[in-house]
Amino acid sequence: MSETFEQSIVSHLEEHVELAISTVQKLRAEKLELEAEIARLNSNVLQRDTKIQELETRNSELEEELDLERLGTSQERSEIKERLEDLMDVLAVSNETEEPDTGDEIAFTAQDDEPDETSPSSSADSAHSE
């Protein structure tokens, strides 16, 4: 082989080696960038998991609090209902034992919202409204 041909082959091989080295360095840099991105994303996932657990715990606490409030409200309603029934029983017994006294009763009469033009009070009402 001629010397120029050998130099050409060596030069060509050197170029390929340099290209391979630069490719390997580039791939290593990209690998480091990707590993850093993966670490960042994993950190985000862990933070979100922690936040989700906190929210689930808070939700459970609020559900327990709501259940206690409902139980308290239900008990309060039962107590009020019981007192109301007792009061109604007392009133029923007192009405049965007392003689009717119609002298102190107040008579209530129903009154129409619309004036009746045939009644004398409606003409007096219309005179007052003018």
Image (cartoon, helix red, strand yellow):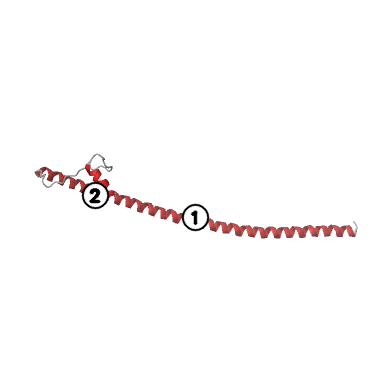
Q: Amino acid at mark 1?
A: Asp
According to the picture, the residue beneath numbered tag 1 turns out to be 49
Left or right? Give the position of 57 relative to 98: right
* Number of marks present in the image shown: 2
- Circles 1, 2 touching at the beta carbon (< 8 Å): no
Tell me how far mark 1 sits from mark 2, CA to CA.
46 Å
What residue is shown at x 70% (from left), y 59% (from top)?
Answer: 26
Indicate which disc residue 40 carries: none
Pick whichever, 34 or 4, lies toward us: 34
Percent across and percent down for residue 119 are 23, 40
Q: Is residue 117 left or right of residue 41?
A: left
Query: Is label 1 or label 2 in front?
Result: 2
Tell me: residue 101, above or below residue 53: above
Residue 117 percent across, percent down from the top left: 26, 40
Residue 4 position within the rendered picture, expressed as x and y whole percent measured from the top left: 89, 59
Of residues 115 and 29, which is closer to you in this image?
Answer: 115
Residue 116 in the image: above or below residue 31: above
Of the image marks 1 and 2, the number of the one nearer the N terminus: 1
Instruction: Give the percent coordinates (x, y) of residue 23.
Output: 72, 58
Residue type highlighted by circle 2:
Ile
Q: Quadrant of the N terminus?
A: bottom right
Looking at the image, residue 47 sits to the left or right of residue 89; the answer is right
For residue 80, the mark is: 2
Q: Quadrant of residue 85?
A: top left
- Judged left or right of residue 12, residue 92 is left
Mark 1, secondary structure of its residue:
helix
